[in-house]
Image: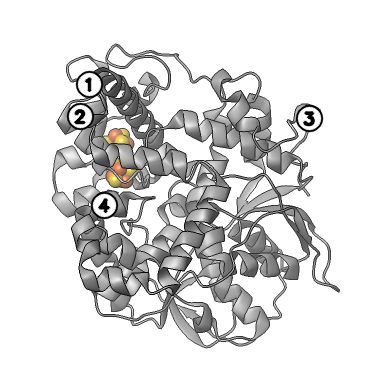
Amino acid sequence: MSAPISSGAKESAPADANAGAALAPRLFGSKRGALPGFTGLDQPREDILRACIRCGYCLPTCPTYLETFSEASSPRGRIRLIQAVADGVLSVTDPGFVEQMYQCLDCRACEAVCPSGVRYGQLVETARTQIERARARSTRRLGVARAGWRRLARAAALDGVFGDLSRVRLAGAAVRLYQRSGARRLARASGALDLLGLRDAEAMLPDLSATPVIPRGEVYPPLPGVERRGRVALLTGCVMGSVFPETDRATIRVLCANGYEVVTPSGQQCCGALAVHSGDLDRARMLACGNIAAFEASGADLVISNAAGCGSALKDYGEFLAHDPAWAERAHAFSACVRDATEPLADLLRHDQLNTSFERTPLRVTYQEPCHLAHAQRITAQPRALLRAIPGVELVEMAESSVCCGSAGVYNLLRPDMAGALGARKARNTLATGAQAVVTANPGCALQLRAELNRADSALPVLHIMDLLDAAYRGRDPLLSAL
Ligand code: SF4
Ligand code: SF4
C-alpha cells in the first residue's frame, strides 16, 4: 500500500474547503527562461520549445492536421508560432496565433509520440494563459462592450459555475427542471434554441433523471469476504457527479468489490481541467489547493478518478504548484497518489487478485480511448485488459481509437465545426467495427460519442467502463446503463 496522500504535510492542511480561494493570491508560476514576446508568469518554456527538432513525427497523430492537412494546424506549426511570439516577431494577440492556440484540442497526441520528448501541453496551456492575460488587460483598457460576448460568457461559466461544486449542482437542478417541466419541448418547438445558437449544446445533454452524487465524506466499506486493500478517495467530479452519478456509484461498487474502502471527501471541487484548457492557470491552482486540502483530510492511500480529463489534471497539480513554496511538496505528494479507476483494478488483474466473480456478459464492444487517458496519462493497456477479463465480452478495436473525438472539455461547444468533423470521423470508425456498444472512460467523450452517433442515425449504446464492470459483477444487462 502506498503512503497516505497527506504524508509529511497533514499538520499544515487548512481545515476548510475554501483553502484554495484564501491562498490563491500567494501562488506564482515560474519566470525561469523568460521569453521576450511573453510577459510575467506562466510562460512557454524555452527549453521545451528548443527540444522540437521539427521531425514531423507528430503530424499524423494530430486530429486538426488530419482534418486540414495544414502545417499551421499541426503541432510543429503551432510550436513555430509560439516560437515566433517568443522571439517578438508575432503579437500574443495576433488573430492567427490565437486561432491556432484555440483550434488545438490540447489532446496531447503529439506529446505521446514525440521522439524528442517535447511537452507540448505545457506550451499550449501557458500560451493560452498568456493570451487570456493580454486580453484581460485589453478588456480593462477597451471596456466590456468590445471584449466579445463569447469570451465573457466562457469566463462567466468558468467563474460562476465550475468555480464551485454547489453551483454545478444548482445548474444541474435547473437543467433537470428544464427537462421535466415541458420547457424543453417548448424551447425545441419554438425555435428559441436555434435563435440562441444552443441547439447542438442542448441536444448533447442526456436526461438528468438520477440523483446527483454530493460528496459529504461518506465511507463505503469493502465487500464482506474480500481481502481488504486499503482506503481510496473518489473525486466525484462536477460533470460526472451531476450528469453521470450512476457511474460514480458503479465505480464505488466496483472498488468495494475489490477490497477497497471508498470515501467521497467533502470539500472537493472541480479538478480545474476546464480552467487549464481555457488559459486560466490561476483558477486551476486555486481549485488545486482546495482539493489537496480536502483529500489530505480523507486519510486515503490513493485518489481515484473515473474521468480521464480530471485524473490528468489531478496528476498535474505537482507541476501547477511546483513554484509555490507553501504548496509544492503537498501538491507533489498528492499527484503521486492519483490513479485512474482502471489502474488499481488492472494491477490486481495482473497479480491474479482481481475479483473475477463476473456474470457472463455476452457483448461485442469497441473501445474509444479518451485523449487524457491514452496520451496525457499513457494508460492504454489497463482498460483493455479489464474489458477482456469479463467473460463473454469481445473487444473489437476501432481504427484511430486514440484520435480525439472532438470533445476536449468544452471545445465541442465553442468550435462545433472542427469538433463535428472529428466526431463524425469517430462515429464512422466506431460503427465500422460492428460492435454492439462503444466503451469509454471520460464523461465528455461519452456525451460527444452519443451526439455524433445520433447524428449518424445510430442508437449504438455508449458505456463507461465502470458501468460495464459493475453490471458484470451484478449480473445485470449493461445496456440498461448505456447512454
Ligand atoms: S514529433 Fe516532437 S520534435 Fe518532432 S516535430 Fe513534433 S513536436 Fe517537434
Ligand atoms: S495537442 Fe492534439 S490537436 Fe493540439 S497540436 Fe497536439 S495533437 Fe494536435
Question: Looking at numbered disc 3 in the image, what kind of residue is underneath it?
Answer: Gly
How far apart are the two marked residues, 2 and 1, measured between alpha carbons?
6 Å
Residue pointed to by mark 1? 142
Using a 10 Å C-alpha cutoff, classify the residue at mark 4 as few (fewer than 14 neighbours), some (14 to 19) or many (20 or more).
many
Q: Secondary structure at mark 3?
A: loop
Helix, strand or loop at mark 1: helix
**CA distance for labels 3 and 1:** 48 Å
Q: Quadrant of ligand 1?
A: top left
Of the 4 image quadrants, the one containing the C terminus is bottom left
Q: Secondary structure at mark 4?
A: helix
**As rendered, which of 421 and 87 lies closer to the eye?**
421
- How far apart marks 3 and 4 lie (CA) works out to 42 Å
Q: Which three-letter amino acid code belongs to the residue tagged 2? A: Arg
Q: Nearer the viewer, mark 2 or mark 3?
A: 2
Identify the amino acid type marked 4.
Pro
Q: Point out residue 219 in the picture as x, y percentages from the top left corner.
A: 78, 59
Q: Label 1: how many residues lie within 10 Å, few (<14), some (14-19) or many (20+)?
A: few
Q: Which residue is mark 4?
A: 63
Residue found 54% across the figure and 45% down from its top: 270
**Where does label 2 land, which residue?**
146
Residue drawn at point x = 26 percent, y = 17 percent: 141
The mark that comes first in sequence, 3 or 1, is 3
Dot 2 crowding, Cα within 10 Å, few <14, some 14–19, many 20+: few
Observer-side mark, 3 or 1, equals 1
Query: Mark 3, residues whose alpha carbon is within 10 Å: few (<14), some, or many (≥20)?
Result: few
Residues tagged 2 and 4 counted as in contact (Cβ below 8 A): no
Q: CA distance from mark 2 to mark 3?
A: 49 Å
Frontmost of labels 3 and 4 is 3
Q: Is mark 4 within 8 Å of ligand 2?
A: yes
What amino acid is labelled 1 in the image?
Leu
Do callouts 2 and 3 mark residues in contact (Cβ within 8 Å)?
Answer: no
